[in-house]
Image (spheres, rainbow, N blue to C red):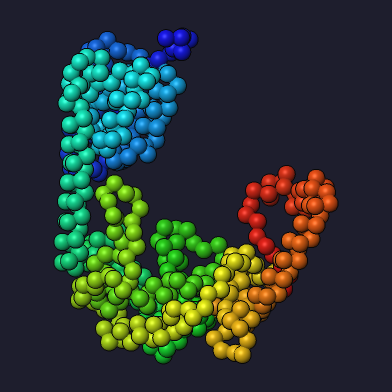
Amino acid sequence: MDRYIGKERHTALYCRLSQDDGNTGESMSISSQKAILEKYAKTEGIYNYRFYVDDGYTGLNTNRPAFQKLINAVKEDTVECVITKDLSRLGRNYIETGECIEVIFPAHNVRYISVNDGVDTLKDNNEIVPFKNVLNEFYSRYISKKIKTAKAIRVSQGKFIVNTAPFGYRKDPKDKNHLIIDDKTAPTVRLIFDLALQNMGNNRIIKILYEKRCPKPSYYKQELFGEMSPDEDSTYDWKFTPVMRILRNPVYKGGMWERTSQKAHFKQKSRGYIRIADRNIIEDVHEAIVSKEEWEIVQKNMDSHSKYKPSKYHIDNIFRGKLICEDCGHTLLMHTESKGKKTPIERTAYYCTSYMRRGIKFCSSHKISYHKIYDILLEDINKCIKEISKNKEKFIKNLAKKYNLKSKNSITKQKVIYRI
């Protein structure tokens, strides 16, 4: 064909290995696959070949670096033959694998050979291919179910199978699936629960943690991996979410969640979040930091706070992450007063995050009402509309000059900053 004239075409030797293949030993290793393919190529008199290797990638989809590189080369008409050890190396999704063999490869005059399966698209012996592709996908489904069942059994037995121990615990040196109390971080967890037992909200707890100079969880991870915080102050800069997660986690009463997420289908990568109310708790699997009674009281206290109650009204936080404190550089948080004669939106204002979490010693409130910000932006937008209607080109030129869009700074994320 004319489209191949002037192009040097090569044979692609494709290798793949992943956890889908189970504990198959050296017979399925990348080095073994390479040796088999290279021997076959030389036996067939093929010397212009290149290896394409995906080590550690599932065959359930085509999101593999070397595979994508191979397909691009096929579509560029620089590949004349693709050889794999067996059909499952090309993929375990029978639809996508079938599309490659029956659509993409023939469209670009590419021969496909599966050494162990005896498949060669140049010959008329390929009726078994669709059935083998279905079996390969069935095998992945079987392995996925087997792994899922094995994990569920281990969890039901109280085995902790997550890689990292939760804050306040560490893995038992004698049993990696068992947790023991970490003397360094457990006192902080105990303090958080003691404060919550006094019916304190998370913002108040965060302020006390900062005042008592209690390092946050990420500090210990940085310490473990040798990457310390850029400044000492950030070491004690607790956020709302870590505190809430600690207080909600049954691990601190000696239990553990059976599952926190799940897959709807074995081919999916993403996992669906299971609501806390729908999670099963396995009790008494390790030593507790707080008693069961204390943990239950904290749950009731948290549920009683307005933060966790369904809101009686809804206000869109359209300025989320866009308002920055001029003094400390932290974002401003939206807060609606629970009482007052005014309407909810009239009781809504933004406050400096540092002030809300650490108090006036670190920064002032920088309070500004929702209405005021809205009016300021609306006025600016109306001005822009008028300028555009008068002279669009002049407006764009002035805007580019104002924000220096041609400079490297234009690449950085733009935020709305008002001097408050």
Q: Is residue 153 visible?
A: yes
Q: Would you place residue 129 above or below residue 5 in this image? A: below
- Write the residue at 76% across / 62% down: 382
Pick the front one: 337 or 254: 337
Q: Would you place residue 57 above or below residue 348 in this image? A: above
Please state if 106 lies on the left or on the right of 368 as rendered.
Answer: left
Give the image location of residue 155, x and y in percent. 20, 64
- Write the residue at 68% across / 75% down: 371
- Write the residue at 44% across / 78% down: 310
Give the image location of residue 197, x and y in percent. 38, 88
Q: Is residue 12 visible?
A: no
- Quadrant position of residue 132: top left
Pick the front one: 245 or 310: 310
Please state if 150 lies on the left or on the right of 53 as rendered.
Answer: left
Q: Would you place residue 212 above or below residue 99 in this image? A: below
Total of numbered circles in the picture?
A: 0
- Quarter containing the N terminus: top left
Give the image location of residue 247, x and y in percent. 37, 78
- Write the residue at 45% across / 71% down: 241
Please state if 227 lies on the left or on the right of 174 as rendered.
Answer: right
The outermost residue toward the front is: 389
- Quarter containing the C terminus: bottom right
- Quadrant position of residue 65: top left
Give the image location of residue 107, x and y in percent. 37, 20
